[in-house]
Image (cartoon, rainbow, N blue to C red):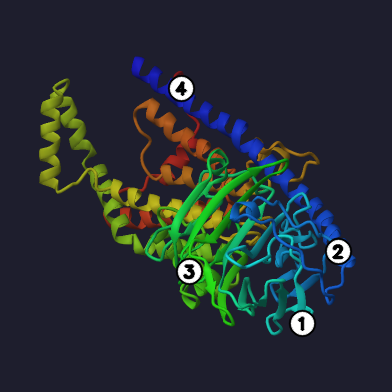
Amino acid sequence: MENNRNSIIAIALTVLVVLAWQFLYMGPRLEEQRAAQEQAAQQQAAQEQTVSTNNAAGSASGSGAAGSTAGGGSDAVFSQAGAQQETAPRVKIETPALSGSINLAGARIDDIKLKDYHVTVDPTSPIVTLFSPADTENGYFAELGFVQGENSGSVPGPQTVWTLEKGDTLTPSTPVELSYTNDSGLTFHRTISIDDDYMITMDDTVTNASDKQVTVNPYGRITRFNLPDEPSAWVLHEGFLGVMTPDGGITEDTYKNVADENETYTGSNGGWFGVTDKYWGTAIIPQSDMNYDVRFSHFNDGRARYQADYSDNQPLTIAAGQSADLKTMVFAGAKVTNILTQYQKQYNIPLFDRMIDWGWLWFITKPLFQLMDFIYHQVGNFGVAILITTVIIKLLFFPLASKQYASMANMKRMQPKMTELKEQYGDDRMGLQKAMMELYKKEKINPVAGCWPVLLQIPIFFALYKVLYVTIEMRHAPFFGWIQDLSAPDPTSLFNLFGLLPWGVPAFLAIGAWPLIMGFTMWLQMRMNPTPPDKTQAMIFNWMPVVFTYMLAQFPAGLVIYYAWNNSLSILQQSIIMKRHGVKIELFDNLKGLFRRKKPASE
């Protein structure tokens, strides 16, 4: 009796923890996400207005007056929050994937919009803005320049207004050319080109027309004044990342860690670095033979900002009458798996596909996504791709599952003998355990065989959760009916009859139709076996589908659909295997027992 009471208390506490987690964490988090989406949509319009005003202030075809950088070294340059000439001319960007402009002040890429992605699932909502000018609320930009060296004089930096030499719109077929000449005989010529997706290439040539050898130090930085709109989650890294050397792994730093202490990585080469959000990423890929230092830093000189930057620790030396070339690439766009993989192969960028946070189980997560993506391109619906992928996983695990259910069937067949042994040995636990082991050995039963298939499928479950949560391909991907975003929770709720009643439901009560379907299939699967004779165990089995239904209600709808479909296939599979082994299927008897009227004792 005491044990039963303790078990009931444990179950009650578990349910209480789950309810508290939903109410105190998941509910507010969902509300924050919805508010962030609304705020992002409003900010889009304000930022577009700011950029259009700046575009009108200067003609992109004009020549700007050359300014000079704040001298004294890279720290002086990096500490500048933004170019002051926000009325400087701009060069328009127009590609199949991007629109925006380049600010000729600092040759700064500070206006990038992603044509293929909207702020919300509503196709009429604004398209996503990635880069914004420094003087906007969500300022975010990439900039490449130079720091003064020996005999160099002034060099292009954050406040330098470049001269537009050729082209008025940057497109995949029409690069633009910029130049800046200082009073020390140095001419900086920059050709900016872009592909159909998200890679911008900057080819710099520095020509020394003086009679002295000069040195300059290239630098590059990605600066942002805002943090991601959506609240962060433990399953995902957002912040700084990079691969500092070709044979190194991914280096990650959170905004919080960098705000506490700047991080510097010396002697980097052949890698890349940048900033990642859930679905969007930015990166600078220095020339592969350059030896440079990378720094992840935080500034708070009136306006907080985060910055990933590099500086060449071996200055570029240019003899009199000679020139030197430098090639740097900037990635700014959506973290599309195939595009990142293509860049990794095309430009030999190490681990560039790991800009997507595949997690510790990347060797499972990425192949699982690639399988789903392949199926998606055949059927045209990611929800259907999830269903087909589940069938394939079931087929792969069929031998193990067969052993699991066969073991369960054998254990069920041995139940009468096990009951006899318990009666025979009574309180003699050592004797009972020895007799049970002899019975298992005689009947060739492995009592733990049924656990392995479940344990092996847990990584698949988490890998699928990761795929649904972090891949942009799942963002706003519809299924059928009311599921228009597989990466978001089911938007319906039992508590307003799935939208039939005209009132909103708090996030912690948003238990949609698909979570209920999943809970029902889980309940059916448990009814495939006899009801445990122990009342506490029976109560646990009865409440478990309820707890899981409530827990998974806030998970991505795609994961809940997978779980429901997986349960349904398991019921079918278990029925076939149990019938093959001559074991009675308890499902129908259990269902009948629920509706059978229990006779009163007087009858």
Point out the residue furthest to the top here. 2
Which mark's residue is nearer the viewer, 2 or 1?
A: 1
Quadrant location of residue 511?
Answer: top right
* Camera-side residue of 426 and 460: 460
What x and y, as percent, mark residue 159?
74, 60
Mark 2 → mark 4, Cα distance in angstroms: 86 Å
Name the residue tied to disc 1.
Answer: 167
Mark 4 → mark 1, Cα distance in angstroms: 97 Å
Which badge, 2 or 1, comes first in the chain's sequence?
A: 2
Which of the numbered marks, if any, corresponds to residue 290?
A: 3
Query: Is 472 left or right of 33, judged from the image as shown?
Result: left
Mark 2 → mark 1, Cα distance in angstroms: 20 Å
Whether label 3 touches label 2, CB < 8 Å:
no
Instruction: Bin the neighbour count of mark 2 within 10 Å (Cα to Cα): few under 14, some 14-19, many 20 and up.
Output: few
Name the residue tied to disc 2.
Answer: 52
Q: Tell me which residue sits at (38%, 30%) in the image.
A: 537
Which badge, 3 or 2, comes first in the chain's sequence?
A: 2
Name the residue tied to disc 4.
Answer: 603
Instruction: Please name the amino acid that badge 3 sits on.
Output: Met
Q: Tell me which residue sits at (60%, 38%) in the image.
A: 26
